[in-house]
Image: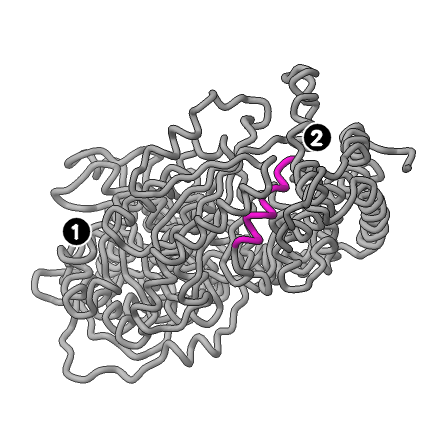
Amino acid sequence: MADDLDPLEQHLLDALRGLAASPGSPSPAPSEAAAAWRAQVDSRHCDHVGRRLQEQGRGFYTIGSAGHESNALVALALRPTDPALLHYRSGGFYLARAGQVGRDGVPDILLGMTAAADEPIAGGRHKVFGHRDLAVIPQTSTIASHVPRAVGIALAVDRARKLGVASAWPSDAVVVCSLGDASVNHATAQAGLNTAAHCAHQRLPLPLLLLCEDNGLGVSVRTPSGWTESALRARPAMRYEQVEGDDPAAVLERSRALVDWVRETRRPAVLHLGVVRFLGHAGADAEVAYRTPAEIRSDLERDPLLATARWLVGAGAASGDELADDYLASRERVRRQADEAARQPQLASAEAVMAPLAPRRPDRVAELAERQPPGGIEALTLAQAINAALGEALEAHPETLLFGEDVAVKGGVYGVTRGLHARFGAGRVFDTVLDETSILGLALGAAVSGLVPIPEIQYLAYLHNAEDQLRGEAATLSFFSQGAYRNGMVVRIAGYGYQRGFGGHFHNDDAVGVLRDVPGVVIASPALPDDASAMLRTCVAAAKVDGSVCVFLEPIALYHVRDLHAEGDGLWTAAPSGAHVPIGSARTHGTGDDLTVVTWGNGLFLSLRVARRLAERGVGARVVDLRWLAPFPLEDVLREANATGRVLVVDETRRTGGVSEGVVAELLDAGYRGRVVRVASKDSFVPLGDAARLVLVSEPEIEAATDALLAD
């Protein structure tokens, strides 16, 4: 007997040695019982050794799966090719799935705990459950933000089959997604549940199994008795089943039946699994501060390892002493594996850390994005050019999907997607539930399944309640899987100010700072029609080639503009070009030597008008259109800044936190030593009506700033 047993271990071993076979002929247990025992025991040892490693200063993660190990039986009811999105108490599930394909998953977990660079999925960047060979998609979420993605994967499985395009998953796959009872209350979980039920209500195929592991606690906050069940039962379009984790035979039987039902009917279901939580929320959590000793002791009898042991002993597959001896032998084996994991090197440079963040293969992107310019096409507006480019993408790439609010039959609020639903069908161009979190979740799921989603967020202001789907899910996937999983997409967002006749801050939002600090995300923001079509092709190509997460910001006020200086001049229209616009490349208008104006979006329209008036006064200005807000086109901007030595940054976003702050910082960091000033919109929300002109940057302000700059 080991002399350093945790009280949880001591209780389990005493109980195991006290188990006796039932009299009479035992009923044989299925092979899954022994597989579950192996996975459960090894998972428990990983939890204990994680705390030991932390005490020794060699480990960095102690959120464990102890008490939740009955999820191993759910894994055994599934196929190892069924995509799984697992929350952080899924050690039993992960090890059971690894066992299905003959893999020892223990080193995977331990290398994650020690932040080892050789950890097979995140490479030491985070402790996650994930592996490409196991169809386990790594999740860093603690608040159920992976649920909308799971819904998207389930929709994509059957949508790919319907469209006849390749998918990352078998055509009859079941998607499993696990979360805790407290997480059910989170807005992202509710969004995912609602969208799943919304699809099921319409009889859309959605083979999703949602596994809710209910231990009754959210860290220290108790879930009211019966609340989780009532919340999960509230959607009649989704089948609901409940089972207790300390009845392993029932867990396996119920899981098998439910998985088979989902696989056959292609409809979503919820398995509500009652579990206990041992060892607190994490290593630093002293649960005696909020739970009574009697309550903690009572949970010991519901230990899933003890329950599985009773099953095996009752079936005559092993004795209690044999299982106790196996537990101790496994304990020593896992400790040896932990010591080996702790000796492995961690990531040693910032470059190594960032390597999988946003890989770029510009030559391959250019090859895919370039095309021969079509003949006989008249000059188009910005909206028409985007529409044409979307049609090209759907035509050229059959795995492309276009969706969002009002994009299908209506053709978008501003007509940008008009005609595409009729041309390509409801399987590829479709309306969604009115929820931006779910729109992005559908895109996340479609993208990781091998499709190329182009979701639309109707207004920039509508992004903000869903932005974590980009920050916490889309942008992190390649980073935390070393590129094993990617979710390339092009998120179209209509935004910025200056709309006439349709105002207010919800429809004239210019807050792009929430996007600019998300590592790896590409932010395109075209203003001219020919740039828009070419840049959209580039984004689609980057999504396909590199798995890039691209945000395509469209200035609403310029959608239908035709003229720049005078009515009828047609200078804001252009025929589509076959030229390629590389990511992170600016475009310069004019060759003036007196002043460089750096801007983008509506600022380009305003600045070009001002530049013409300056030219009439004998002042030569060159206007640089950033086109890409990330990655920043530093080389182009620095070249044009040095050409004149005077720079004016025209920023339609807010002065505080706006793009111009970044432009000035980039120039100074790069060694620019000329004059630089900026003019920006006020630190205000955009009001209704003519009052909007009082806070948005204007032509008179730009002209006054140029005069002041030239006067120095």
Give the amino acid type for the residue marked by disc 2 in the picture: Leu
Left or right: 305 as drawn, with respect to 139: right
Screen quadrant of the N terminus: top right
Q: At which x and y percent is residue 260?
A: 43, 55
Q: At which x and y percent is residue 136?
A: 56, 56
**Comes first in the chain, label 2 or label 1:** 2
Asked if residue 633 lies in the magenta stretch, the reply is no
| Occupied quadrant, residue 392 | bottom left
Residue holding disc 2 = 279
Work out whether 143 lies above or below 300: below
What segment is highlighted magenta in the picture?
Answer: 67-77
- Which one is nearer the viewer's eye here, 361 or 322? 322
Give the amino acid type for the residue marked by disc 1 in the picture: Val
Q: Could you tell me what secondary structure mostly forms the magenta stretch?
A: helix
Report helix, strand or loop for mark 1: loop
Residue holding disc 1 = 413
Q: At which x and y percent is residue 189?
A: 42, 39
Q: At which x and y percent is residue 232?
A: 39, 34
Asked if residue 69 lies in the magenta stretch, the reply is yes
- Judge depth for marks 2 and 1 and give the one in front: 2
The residue sitting at 42% across, 30% down in the picture is 229
